[in-house]
Amino acid sequence: METTIKLFIIGLGLIVFSSCISDDDGEDLPVVDEKFISDLGQKYFQSLSFDDPAAFNVENWIQLTDEDVVSNDPWGSPAKNGHQDLRDWSAGLITGFGAINFTVNASFVAAERVAIYWTSSARDPAGNPFEFSGIDVFEVNNRGTIAEIEGYWIADPTVPIAEEVIAAGQNYFQTLNFADPNTFDVEKWIATMDKDVVVNDAYGSPERIGHEAQRRFSQGLLGSGMQAIEFTIDFQVASGNRTAIKWTATADFGPGASISWDGIDVLEVNAAGKITKVFGYWDESVFGS
């Protein structure tokens, strides 16, 4: 009986310890798991929405970010560093919109990041409605706040779209498709990438660096028993030297054995039109890993 009581007390202590982790300053930290990160992404866009600029609670939105947050939103614009820069940025939001409401269309957590495909329904100050969409990627720290923001959307429609960046993303997925493993042109797919490309796909898994690493990956793909694979681009946007893509894939492993899944990739493209970085956000467990 005494042993049972001791074990109960020890177990209770472990439960309390695991649900209330402290940092070096003794402050209680949240358990930052996949659900927490996904929910934080939802809260970010909820707190950024308003029907009346006068009712927009800037501090409610800012508190979701780290005090030293780095925001590249949209990507390619000057970085915003810290809470005061976000406050200054929000002033433009308040004066530029009569209302803005964000809808999260899809969300994918990979390691400490979440990639979100969103649509905004807005009104200008004169009351005219319009819509636009984009993709954001947030990196969440162990304190449960957003430490980095990457935004991919068109902030100024008058600025020409970087067609070579868009084309690089489309070619990447088109050349990865095959209806028969014997017709998959590995070298054509690899040619879309720079020789020193760095691939984090899915993000949090070991990096694949350079062409030879991509060849080894393709050998594993072909050796998995996959008979066909097709990627469909659902949404694509370019910001600066990057393109963000929401995609859907279907793979065939033989009669009655097919799977479908979706995700988001962010690709960085150099001046030669070659992909230098790949960040993939999707659920690897679709393959049973």
Image: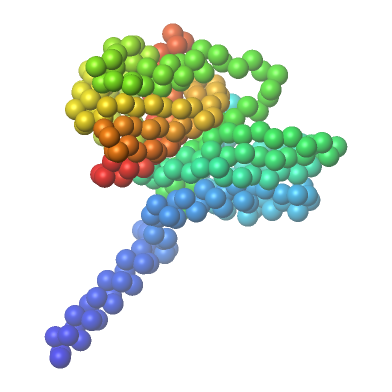
In the image, what residue occupies the spot 33% across and 21% down? Answer: 179
Asked if residue 40 is positioned above or below residue 21 in the image, the reply reads above
What is the tally of numbered marks visible in this picture? 0
In the image, what residue occupies the spot 24% across and 75% down? Answer: 11
Q: Position of residue 252 (x, y in %)?
A: 31, 32
Quarter of the image with the C terminus is top left
How was this image coloured?
Answer: rainbow
Outermost top residue: 272
86 left or right of 199 in image:
right
In the image, what residue occupies the spot 31% across and 71% down? Answer: 15
Residue 224 quadrant: top left
Asked if residue 210 is positioned above or below residue 10 in the image, the reply reads above
> 173 or 150: nearer the eye?
173
1 left or right of 118 in image:
left
Outermost bottom residue: 1
Q: Position of residue 67 (x, y in %)?
A: 53, 48
Q: Position of residue 34 (x, y in %)?
A: 40, 52
> 220 or 279: nearer the eye?
220
Quarter of the image with the N terminus is bottom left
Can residue 27 be seen in the rendering of this structure?
Answer: yes
Residue 13 quadrant: bottom left
